[in-house]
Amino acid sequence: MLVLGIETSCDETGVAVYDSDRGLLAHALHSQVALHDAYGGVVPELASRDHIRRLLPLIREVLRRAAVKEPDLNAVAYTQGPGLAGALLVGAAVANSLAFGLGVRAIGVHHLEGHLLSPLLEKKAPSFPFVALLVSGGHTQLMRVSGVGEYEMLGETLDDAAGEAFDKTAKLLGLGYPGGPALAKLAQDGRPDRFAFPRPMLEQLEKNGNLNFSFSGLKTAVVALTRTRALDEQTRADVAAAFQEAVADVLVAKSLAAMRATALDRLVVAGGVGANIRLRSLLDAAASRGKFSVFYPAMEFCTDNGAMIALAGCLRLKTAKATRALPLGFTVRPRWDLADVAA
Ligand code: KG4
Ligand code: ZN
């Protein structure tokens, strides 16, 4: 089964071809970072227009690299939501038109399901069931994943997502967009113990096993500190390191608690913040102590990409319920809860 995957939910145009037998055949990504940098964040209208410009050439390029002709495709998968409405519409329109023209199925994929299943792209892939820690720019969730489409929420953020907290803190420190990678780089030169930032929701975990997250208080603590101090180079690096440590500590503690609560022995980490090296090393250490295995997607598949959408589309194609009659209309779902995705 050959599936073309298209990702246009935010500021990356991602395209890939996935083969159910041979795995990922080719993928390509066009990042809009340079386009939005001057504005300090994603400008939705500019994002949509750039997806329009990039998507068709990128599809041609990926098909060429995969040595696949359009008629060989069995389905076209695309990110149907959540994300920016205009950006989603570009991918949805192209995917549905292409699928209609080829007489194959168009499969609307939930963006987070793509992230969640992305470690399955790796040679050392986890088998079901597993616990997933999904840490992206818009979401922070712990889930029990029993199979494709079988997701049980264990805990989620009550306010800011981990990636969002990274981005906002990076902005406070005068770093560019996207802030996460820049903050992580600055943190390498900092001392994590110079400032004691709060570990939100850890008390609740100890009291009643609550697996929810909250990061807005941590951000407020950084705001308060940066207002009262001159931000010389070393102080900025120390703030970055202390902030990163606080976020990673909370993510690790809650993941450990989720492993205990579910009695599972596989943890999957996905989403942009999953690229954070400090988080990865703390999780690896916790895993060897706690006797469970941690699975990550390759660095390039932590952040948004077409490969995870092609893979998720391929897995969906195999499940009977996903193969509805080919509709001629389509819609996008800018707001879409993963819990509403049926198995
Ligand atoms: O999954 P993703 O590419 O997009 C969403 O679906 O949101 O995640 C993007 C988020 C951004 O907030 C970005 O700052 C963060 O992931 N991020 C990182 C790192 N790389 C990306 N955060 C911390 N450390 C990193 N190395
Ligand atoms: Zn994403």
Image (cartoon, rainbow, N blue to C red):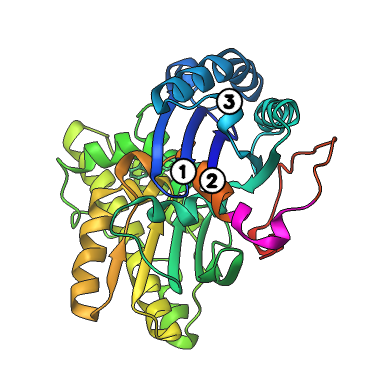
Quarter of the image where the C terminus is located: bottom right
In the figure, 110 relative to 340: above or below? above
Q: Tell me the residue at 38%/50% (across/down).
A: 121
* Viewer-side residue, 114 vs 185: 114
Label 3: how many Cα within 10 Å (few below 14, some 14–19, many 20+): some
Image coordinates of residue 185 in percent, x first then y, are 23, 37
Asked if residue 310 lies in the magenta stretch, the reply is no
Q: Which mark is residue 1?
A: 2
Q: Which residue is mark 1?
A: 19
Q: Which residue is mark 3?
A: 70
Q: Which mark is residue 123?
A: none
Chief secondary structure of the magenta portion: helix
Q: Amino acid at mark 3?
A: Glu
The segment highlighted magenta reads 316-324
In the figure, 219 relative to 149: above or below? above
Image coordinates of residue 164 in percent, x first then y, are 48, 45
In the displayed structure image, the side of residue 51 where residue 240 appears, left or right: left
Q: Tell me the residue at 60%/35% (across/down).
A: 9
Q: Secondary structure at mark 1?
A: strand
Q: Amino acid at mark 1?
A: Asp
Indicate which disc, 2 or 3, sits on the residue closer to the N terminus.
2
